[in-house]
């Protein structure tokens, strides 16, 4: 149990995609314990092979090992068995808005594009459809977190590091696509970014202010 809780906190700090520097006194706040116990936990995680750790001035540099990531994925699979099987398709409604124009830049990166092709079975149009959820749908948005996500891993292109995220297969007015949720995002929770194999604005003949229906697929229907 100690390993799951601690690895989850480290993963939330970004230690799955990159190395993270932290001290025991910092980590103790994340696992609600003393600094001395936090230090022992990190040492035990290293001895058990769940993290790699290098002591440096002011703390340690930590990252999850393959064994650590596997342990978290197994835990996640167990929770899917518990929670996901009872959830039907989730229907959300919102209005099309203009985004910040960042989607085209990020999606076109081969480090992301190759994962989208492999995991979603389509090559996304280089851009996103931005939808602001209506009030009732915004209140239901958290239910999506109980459904099966497809994980997109971060990568380094030699010049900078790009973070990971999650995808949820959806249909937008009958067209297959996916909601993408970066691990680190400045967008509010009621705003969804959607990718699809076509430019949705043109395919659906929609523009800013138009209402769209987004169906998040039942995890039992997901690949």
Image (cartoon, rainbow, N blue to C red):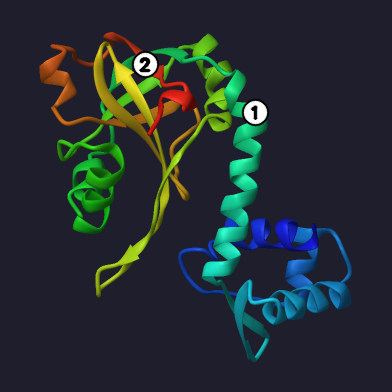
The residue wearing badge 2 is 214
Q: Is residue 59 above or below residue 180?
A: below
Across and down, in percent, residue 172 comes to 29, 17
Across and down, in percent, residue 160 comes to 30, 69
Report whether 163 appears left or right of 88. Answer: left
Considering the numbered disc 1 on the image, is that residue within a helix, a strand or a loop? helix
Q: 15 or 82: which is nearer to us? A: 82
**Which mark sits nearer the N-terminus, 2 or 1?**
1
Q: Is disc 2 surrounded by few (<14), some (14 to 19) or many (20+) residues within 10 Å?
A: many
Q: Is residue 175 above or below residue 81?
A: above
Across and down, in percent, residue 131 comes to 34, 22
Question: In what quadrant of the picture does the C terminus appear?
Answer: top left
Q: 25 or 38: which is nearer to us? A: 38
Q: 222 or 8: which is nearer to us? A: 222
Q: Is disc 1 surrounded by few (<14), some (14 to 19) or many (20+) residues within 10 Å?
A: few
Q: Please name the residue shown 47% across and 25% down the image.
A: 220
């Amino acid at each position: 149990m100690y390993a799951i809780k601690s690895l989850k906190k480290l993963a939330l700090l970004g230690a799955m995609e990159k190395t993270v520097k932290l001290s025991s006194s910092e980590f103790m706040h994340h696992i609600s314990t003393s600094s001395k116990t936090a230090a022992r936990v990190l040492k035990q995680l290293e001895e058990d092979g769940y993290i790699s750790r290098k002591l440096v001035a002011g703390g340690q540099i930590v990252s999850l090992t393959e064994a650590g990531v596997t342990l978290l994925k197994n835990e996640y699979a167990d929770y899917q068995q518990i929670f996901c099987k009872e959830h039907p398709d989730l229907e959300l409604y919102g209005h099309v808005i203009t985004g910040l124009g960042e989607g085209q830049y990020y999606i076109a990166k081969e480090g992301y594009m190759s994962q989208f092709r492999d995991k979603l079975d389509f090559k996304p149009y280089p851009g996103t459809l931005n939808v602001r959820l209506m009030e009732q749908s915004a209140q239901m948005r958290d239910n999506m977190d109980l459904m099966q996500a497809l994980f997109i891993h971060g990568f380094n292109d030699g010049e900078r590091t790009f973070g990971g995220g999650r995808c949820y297969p959806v249909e937008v007015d009958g067209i297959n696509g996916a909601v993408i949720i970066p691990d680190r995002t400045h967008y509010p929770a009621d705003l969804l970014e959607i990718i699809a194999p076509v430019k949705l604005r043109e395919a659906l003949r929609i523009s800013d202010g138009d209402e769209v229906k987004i169906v998040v697929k039942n995890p039992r229907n997901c690949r």
